[in-house]
Image (cartoon, rainbow, N blue to C red):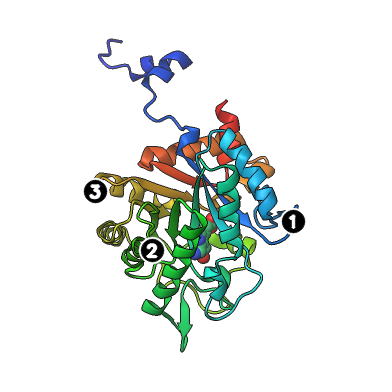
Amino acid sequence: MELTHRPRRLRRTESVRSLVRETVLRADDLILPMFVTEGEQQRQPIESMPGQFRFSVDELVRECSEIYQLGIPAVNLFGYAEEKDDRATKSYDPNGLIQRAVAAIKETVPELCVQTDIALDPYTHHGHDGLVVDGEIVNDETISVLCKMAVSHAEAGVDWVAPSDMMDGRVGAIRVALDDAGFDQVGILAYSAKYASCFYGPFRGALDSAPKKGDKKTYQMDPANAREALREISLDIEEGADVVMVKPALAYLDVIAAARQAFDVPIAAYNVSGEYGMIVAAAERGWADREKAVMETLTAIKRAGADMILTYFAKEAVGYMR
Ligand code: PBG
């Protein structure tokens, strides 16, 4: 048979395939989300996320040194707050857990890009990302707390703050607050298109932060919407976001790709806890090869257009790259 085009020629050997490979995952693309807890010498296994831990600050620093040596450029910290109240006052305590964690990492591994979550849910009884007044998650009052939280992290030495709350206008307000406090070099990684997703379940177990009442649908986005994501992203860019995020990643690859087409700022994608859990569980049952599933997933997120990926598989993936 005479055939002009035989695309299989470019798939014949691994050498040829490597020449034509369009997307290559690197350690440099990865950000490891980490959980911090009070105490010393603590590496508490997280029941809802097998293989992940809550680290006390001393252990966190140890782990961060290792991560940096492996070539992973960044971590994103979440605090397990023991003291919760209705105004999330612990979120901006200058001696709070996250503030101490940031300072400790910066002292030992100053080159590591340290990022922190900016949202109130771990610090409130009700588990919502904003303050609740008469049953409503209030926007503008929440933002003033977020600004204090961001500035307190900047004082501790954070590189990037990552507002994940989906309140309107918080990126602009945080930018002004940081600049006014003299932190014009602290970056903002904005959770711009964050969906009201079922895939955050295991994370809420890790921080004991599930909303006690209701859901997050009045602030996080409807999974059915893509155009709205572009609008959210463009508002965050206008407000001064340095990097914009789509979250979760896997069920939203089309949104990542559309954002890549529409904007020229770096795009992050969050391979969230439920996506982690699906691979871990399937591999445990022998339904998927864990290594292949991890690498295929992360490569796909990058192929869709993400410049950087937050993933609990960061350390493991770097192991597979060697
Ligand atoms: C909270 C926050 C959540 C995640 C990151 N920051 C949970 C939520 O919005 O309820 C989820 C991360 C994950 O599932 O891995 N502001």
Q: Are marks 2 and 1 in contact (CB under 8 Å)?
A: no
- Which comes before the other along the chain, label 3 or label 2? 2
Q: Nearer the viewer, mark 2 or mark 1?
A: 2
As drawn, the residue found furthest toward the front would be: 182
- Is 252 located above or below residue 28 in the figure? below
Amino acid at pointer 1: Glu
Q: Secondary structure at mark 1?
A: loop
Gap between marks 1 and 3 measured at Cα: 46 Å
Left or right of 298 on screen, residue 65: right
Q: Nearer the viewer, mark 1 or mark 3?
A: 1
Gap between marks 2 and 1 measured at Cα: 32 Å
Amino acid at pointer 2: Ala
Q: Quadrant of residue 232?
A: bottom left
Rendered image: mark on residue 40: 1
Q: Nearer the viewer, mark 3 or mark 2?
A: 2
- Of residues 80 and 205, the one nearer the viewer is 80
Left or right of 230 on screen, residue 59: right
Q: Which residue is pictured at 32% across the width and 69% down the height?
A: 169
Position of the C terminus by quadrant: top right
Residue 198 visible somewhere in the drawing: no
- Of residues 9 and 79, the one nearer the viewer is 79
**Residue topped by disc 2:** 181
Gap between marks 3 and 2 measured at Cα: 33 Å
Rendered image: mark on residue 262: 3
